């Protein structure tokens, strides 16, 4: 099966038409060979106007390619390799081991998915409905009863293939739950569409397939972000469509929402469906781009959905540059669209300038979208936030020099009222110069009161060999962004996660002795409250959902996938082996304690079990789960329950999901 990162080349989306009166580019744009833009958010009048836009961009792209090739030199900035990393800074004294904590208490509540924003669920591989934990793996759903017969335990009540035909080229990636419904999102190369399969679950934990829908799109896959969200009963889906190579002389075939009826020999037989959007729904480009995409976000109410219904979605679409980050709050969808490499002149005098960008706001209420001209590029969705009536971001500021070992960054903040249908340029005061992360790779995270980011010296996730490294952590008060606090961490920063209301968990390596975990206390002046070494343990998964915590005012627990060998610690997105789950406790003073492991069993798979579809775990396969005063760990094909005795965790029971399912 084709690699996911090549999938976007396999689908050419067909969408609308354009005749444009180019307008003056926003400040900061190069006037040379400008593609058409419009001064305000306005939609195309129809296919003819959109196609005229596509023709104009194609002609300019061809001319620009010829110009760039003529001026190309082998030692140009664009072709130069990034410089080697600088020597690591001097090593600080090692953190003292934490004192053992007895009688660790589980806070009230539950934490199944480590989401970015409270109230906005994100598609993942484990969800909870009542007493049932549902697992998505290998294109299948597994239902685990955590209270069989009304008593604590683990029992497999149902297993169902999401796929219908093992010959289909499918990836099944994300799952959301709403009411008694389970929504599984995947990508079908055969249908060139995102597939949403809806199951219902009954009181006995049995699964029933309700419907299947196709949304025409390129592959949505991202190594860090998630394609689906659930907000107030609304399914939110982002779908990209690459129109750079659209043939403007061919009739339009608009992306559709179709309901599956049955499988045919070559393609699924579906209802005729209805357009996900057409030219009349697409907002024209307000920034020039030579590599245009249609970025679309769909809001699909689930409350009144019944079996046999079409999926009724409201879609908003924009033509913009290729690079984007997708963030959802409880009231709005945000897209930060930045110029891609096709729109950057890396051989010019301004190659180090920050890239041009646009911030789009799409209200979940259906009100008119708004935009703001900006600069810079966020490294991922965690560099974006909307709170307190303003939008905030941490932006890379190096333009073509984005592989710098000492990246420049800016804190961006702008009132939401500054976005409009006739976009303006964000003023200079919106960008606050912040300390460099001082490392090739940095991770950001927002809390209500702080932006925190930290770095490591290499893009690699492997621990350093034969050297000792530290990391820089910067805490920026969102109310006083000109007053950042810089903290030297006793290890590089591999992961930054929220851990309770006032703490940030940092993971990374000081050397190859094992994974260090630090707790950053934000209650007063930010400080590292404690650091604990998980000796000979190494992180194995990269996604935010791999980490989880449940921490209250008096402390709590956190867990993450680890392995015992350095060679397995690359956190590659295609890694599909099961991991152990390491657990740590934290007390009210922020002191950490290693509680031990719930171990993976590399021989767990039942001999009768065979994976047929979606056999690479692009979203990982290991999770820590805290719910109902109990602790669980998904590890590959097993669900494990742990229990606390003193200051250690031990196994209570485990369930092999690959065993033959119960008879219906």
Image (cartoon, rainbow, N blue to C red):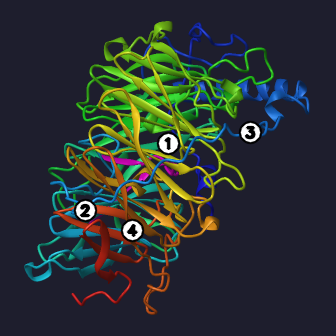
Residue at x-position 28% and y-position 74% = 641
Up/down of 307 relative to 222, above or below: below
Q: Work out whether mark 4 precedes mark 2 in sequence or the reverse, and give the earlier one.
A: 2
Neighbour class for label 4 at 10 Å: few (<14), some, many (≥20)?
some
Sequence-wise, the earlier of marks 4 and 3 is 3
Give the residues drawn in magenta, as a range.
210-229
Q: Are marks 3 and 2 in contact (CB under 8 Å)?
A: no
Q: Residue at x 17, y 63 (%)?
A: 629
Residue of label 3: 87
Between marks 3 and 2 in the image, the one whose residue lies nearer the viewer: 2
Q: Nearer the viewer, mark 3 or mark 1?
A: 3
> Is the residue 602 above or below the residue 50 in the image?
below
Dot 3: within a 10 Å radius of its alpha carbon, few (fewer than 14), some, or many (20 or more) residues?
few
Q: Is residue 316 visible?
A: yes
User: Which residue has dot 4 on it?
Assistant: 596
Looking at the image, tell me whether mark 2 or mark 1 is earlier in sequence order. 2
Q: CA gap, disc 2 to disc 1?
A: 51 Å
The residue depicted at 74 percent of the width and 36 percent of the height is: 86
Q: Position of residue 663 (x, y in %)?
A: 24, 90
Nearer to us: label 2 or label 1? 2
Residue 224 inside the magenta-drawn segment: yes
Q: Give the x, y percent position of residue 182.
A: 26, 62
* Mark nearer the viewer, 4 or 1: 4
Badge 2 crowding class, 10 Å Cα cut-off, few under 14, some 14 to 19, many 20 or more, is: few
Q: Which numbered circle lies on residue 102?
A: 2
Q: Which residue is mark 1?
A: 240
């Amino acid at each position: 099966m084709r690699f996911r990162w090549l999938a976007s080349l396999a689908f050419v989306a067909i969408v609308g038409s354009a005749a444009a009166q180019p307008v003056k580019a926003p400040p900061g744009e190069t006037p040379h060979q400008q593609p058409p833009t419009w001064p305000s958010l306005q939609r195309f009048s129809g296919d003819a106007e959109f196609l005229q836009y596509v023709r104009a961009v194609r002609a300019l792209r061809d001319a620009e390619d010829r110009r760039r090739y003529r001026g190309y030199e082998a030692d140009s900035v664009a072709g130069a390799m990034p410089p080697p990393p600088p020597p690591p800074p001097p090593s600080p004294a090692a953190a003292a081991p934490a004192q053992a904590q007895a009688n660790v208490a589980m806070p009230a509540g539950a934490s199944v998915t480590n989401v970015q924003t409270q109230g906005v669920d994100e598609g993942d591989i484990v969800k909870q409905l009542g007493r049932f934990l549902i697992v998505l793996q290998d294109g299948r759903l597994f239902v685990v009863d955590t209270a069989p017969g009304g008593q604590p335990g683990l029992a497999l009540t149902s297993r169902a293939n999401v796929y219908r035909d093992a010959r289909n080229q499918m990836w099944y990636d994300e799952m959301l739950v709403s009411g008694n419904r389970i929504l599984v999102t995947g990508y079908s190369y055969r249908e060139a569409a995102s597939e949403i399969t809806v199951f219902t679950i009954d009181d006995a934990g049995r699964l029933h397939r309700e419907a299947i829908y196709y949304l025409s799109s390129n592959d949505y896959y991202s190594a860090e972000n998630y394609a689906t969200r659930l907000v107030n009963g609304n399914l939110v889906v982002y779908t990209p469509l690459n129109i750079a190579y659209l043939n403007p002389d061919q009739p339009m075939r608009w992306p559709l929402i179709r309901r599956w009826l049955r499988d045919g020999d070559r393609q699924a037989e579906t209802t005729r469906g209805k357009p996900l959007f057409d030219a009349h729904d697409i907002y024209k480009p307000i920034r020039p781009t030579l590599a245009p995409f249609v970025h679309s976000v769909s809001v699909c109410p689930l409350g009144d959905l019944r079996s046999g219904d079409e999926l009724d979605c409201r879609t908003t679409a924009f033509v913009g540059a290729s690079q984007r980050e997708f963030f959802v709050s409880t009231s709005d969808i945000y897209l930060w669209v930045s110029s891609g490499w096709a729109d950057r002149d890396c051989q010019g005098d301004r190659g180090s300038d920050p890239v041009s960008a646009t911030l789009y706001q799409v209200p979940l209420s259906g009100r008119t979208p708004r935009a703001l001209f900006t600069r810079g590029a966020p490294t991922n969705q965690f560099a974006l936030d909307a709170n307190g009536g303003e939008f905030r971001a941490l932006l890379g500021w190096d333009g073509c020099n984005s592989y710098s070992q000492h990246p420049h960054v800016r804190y961006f903040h702008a009132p939401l009222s500054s976005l409009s249908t006739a976009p303006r340029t964000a003023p200079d005061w919106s960008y606050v110069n912040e300390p460099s992360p001082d490392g090739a790779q940095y991770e950001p995270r927002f809390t209500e009161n702080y932006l925190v980011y930290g770095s490591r010296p290499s893009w690699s996730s492997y621990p350093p060999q034969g050297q000792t490294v530290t990391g820089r952590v910067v805490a920026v008060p969102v109310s006083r962004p000109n007053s950042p606090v810089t903290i030297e961490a006793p290890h590089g920063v591999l992961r930054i996660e929220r851990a309770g209301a006032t703490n940030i968990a940092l993971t990374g390596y000081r050397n190859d002795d094992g994974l260090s975990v630090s707790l950053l206390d934000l209650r007063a002046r930010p400080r590292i409250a404690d650091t604990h070494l998980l000796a000979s343990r190494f992180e194995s998964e990269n996604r935010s959902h791999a980490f989880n915590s449940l921490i209250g005012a008096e402390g709590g627990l956190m867990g993450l996938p680890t392995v015992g060998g350095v060679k397995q610690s690359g956190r590659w997105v295609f890694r599909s082996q099961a991991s152990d789950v390491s657990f740590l406790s934290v007390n009210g003073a922020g002191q950490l304690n290693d509680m031990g492991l719930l171990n993976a069993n590399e021989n767990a798979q039942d001999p009768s079990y065979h994976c047929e579809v979606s056999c690479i775990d692009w979203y990982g396969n290991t999770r820590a789960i805290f719910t109902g005063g109990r602790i669980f760990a998904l590890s590959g094909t097993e669900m494990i329950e742990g229990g606390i005795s003193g200051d250690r965790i031990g196994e209570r029971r485990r369930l092999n999901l690959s065993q033959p399912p119960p008879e219906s």
